[in-house]
Image (cartoon, rainbow, N blue to C red):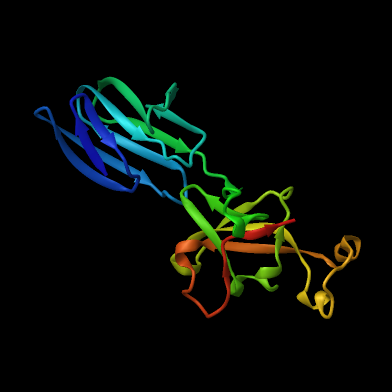
Amino acid sequence: VYTKSYDGIWMHLYTANNAEIEWRGKKINIDVDTNYPWEGKIEITVNGEGNFSFYLRVPGWCDRWSVKVNGSEIETKKDRGYVKIERLWSKGDKIELNLEMEAEYVESHPNIKDNVGRLAIKRGPIVYCLEQVDNSFDIEDLEVILSEKLSTEYSHILGGVVVIKGKGKVISKDVWKNKLYIPKRILEEKRREVEFKAIPYYAWANREPGPMLVWVKKY
């Protein structure tokens, strides 16, 4: 979680913890309160005195972040994955790091032919998937609607996770019975709008047998 350097302390992973770190003959106590990775807010209390730097990792998935010290926002610049806070610290100083984590679609490199025309869903550091148990339609038929915003909510399933919901369209495979080609206008008439639910990928295969899908078709 932490390492030390000649000028200060580096924080690499975000989890609620309490640590005592010895740095240049001083004992610095660090208390962290967070619900990461479900929330992007990390509150850090620094119980130590003196002039040193505190480095916070900004994960590669995060495009927007903010840092406050004792309630006041400070300007930070990301350098090789970290932001640096250099100051004269007093006992009880508080750092608040906010990592924005909107649910979003991601696309793979076009050379990955199996994923062309498909998207995955992620939020923060977590990749999501669709399981059949959560959706009333055949998930292989789903085409996500990109113009519809994804929403999130906390659910008590699977020990407590944030689930993602969105809108898509489906068309039954029965439409293709005895047909190789169908005019697009006719297919559009057969499509219906549905709401889908996605869960964290790490949590799949814990309820009942059924299909799972990470890369979904886009409408």
x, y (%) of residue 189?
89, 65
x, y (%) of residue 93?
30, 28
x, y (%) of residue 62?
48, 39
Name the foreground residue: 47 vs 171: 171
Q: In this rendering, would 206 be left or right of 84?
A: right
Tell me the residue at 64%/60% (across/down).
216
Q: In this rendering, would 35 be left or right of 211?
A: left
**Residue 129 lies in quadrant:** bottom right
Name the foreground residue: 197 vs 216: 216
Tell me the residue at 53%/50% (across/down).
123
Please determine whether, in this image, residue 206 is positioned above or below residue 67.
Answer: below
Q: Which quarter shows the N terminus?
A: top left
Please determine whether, in this image, residue 204 is positioned above or below residue 124.
Answer: below
Q: Which quarter shows the C terminus?
A: bottom right
Name the foreground residue: 109 vs 23: 109
Please determine whether, in this image, residue 65 is positioned above or below residue 142.
Answer: above
Spot the residue most to the left. 25
Name the foreground residue: 17 vs 166: 166
Q: Is residue 160 visible?
A: no
x, y (%) of residue 120?
58, 55
Report how many numbered discs are placed on residues in the image.
Answer: 0
Q: In this rendering, would 23 be left or right of 132?
A: left
Q: In this rendering, would 185 be left or right of 29?
A: right
Tell me the residue at 38%/33% (across/down).
81
Q: Is residue 155 visible?
A: yes
Tell me the residue at 64%/58% (across/down).
165
Please determine whether, in this image, residue 77 is positioned above or below residue 203.
Answer: above
**Residue 91 lies in quadrant:** top left
